[in-house]
Amino acid sequence: MTATEGDTENPRVAASDRTGVRSPDILATDGLTKKFGGITAINNVDFSVEEGELRCLIGPNGAGKSTLFKLLTGQHTPTSGHVYYDGEDITDLEPHERIDRGMSMKFQAPSVFESLSVRENMRTAAQRVIDGNLDPYVDEKLNEFELADSADMTASDLSHGQTQILEIAMALSLDPKMLLLDEPVAGMSVEESEEVAEMLNELHEETDKTFIVIEHDIDFVDMISDQVTVLSQGEIFRQGTIEEIRNDAEVREIYLGGE
Ligand code: ADP
Ligand code: MG
């Protein structure tokens, strides 16, 4: 490291200058590594996403996608390397501090409150961003995500797909600058997946939010993504458009080999 103590400069600025990229990266990692005992789940990864992008992260099971995700959100502490967000080194920030800065996330494992109603679940998210009367905001969000009809249902009575949609709605209720989704459509019906794809596409077009979506299902990726990063064995294997990735023989091979 050549940077001095307290230096707020970060490599993303230099990287943008080098490549002539116009939009600055909102997120970047530098030499990010995570080891679990003898397993290197993420190996020296330099990953970056521009502001306003909808980036998909794909790769076979065990590639390290969820581990990278948890390093970005602060659920895991890296063995080495750094995470930069919005121009600052956030490597040492707690997950809630990252949320306060505008990062919102939906993990692979469901995390709704099963004994609460849909409305009550939405309230728990809304109270993070609204002072005072939550009702108007919660009603607005229930309508926006087409959850008004199931508002009084207990979350445990929802279908798997509806639960995922509730979770995405809760994450979006925080009005984040960046939304990270780990396998948002796993276990969903085709119709539900299409609904989520449509929702993400609309948000991507109409807002300047940044999305990072981890998905195993390349057909879903096809519906939403332009740029795709392929992770394999803890490393970035390819990056390109969905067409480039789909037509890449080596990518197909790691997918087949990983199943
Ligand atoms: P993916 O999400 O791409 O399927 P993961 O990030 O979950 O992959 O896992 C990557 C590798 O790290 C796997 O070999 C997995 O077994 C290992 N791993 C993930 N989390 C842990 C953990 N908490 N403890 C030990 N090993 C882990
Ligand atoms: Mg995973």
Image (cartoon, rainbow, N blue to C red):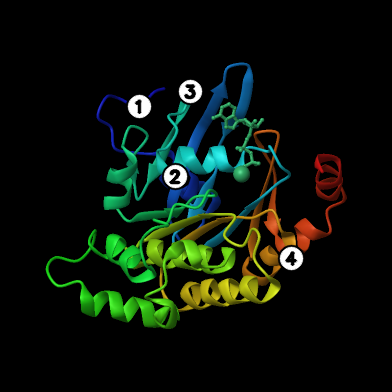
Q: What residue would you read off at disc 3?
A: 79
What amino acid type is highlighted by mark number 1? Answer: Ala
Residue at mark 1: C-beta within 8 A of ligand 1 = no
Any part of residue 12 in sight: yes
Name which of mark 2 and mark 1 comes first in the sequence.
1
Pointer 1 local density, CA inside 10 Å: few below 14, some 14–19, many at least 20: few
Q: Which mark is residue 3?
A: 1
Q: How many angstroms separate mark 2 from mark 1 (CA)?
A: 14 Å
* Horizontal and vertical percent position of residue 255: 81, 47
Name which of mark 2 and mark 3 comes first in the sequence.
2
Q: Nearer the viewer, residue 254 or 150?
A: 150
Q: How many angstroms separate mark 2 from mark 3 (CA)?
A: 21 Å
Q: Which mark is residue 12?
A: 2
Q: Nearer the viewer, residue 256 or 207?
A: 256
Instruction: Give SS at disc 4.
Output: helix
* Horizontal and vertical percent position of residue 176: 35, 61
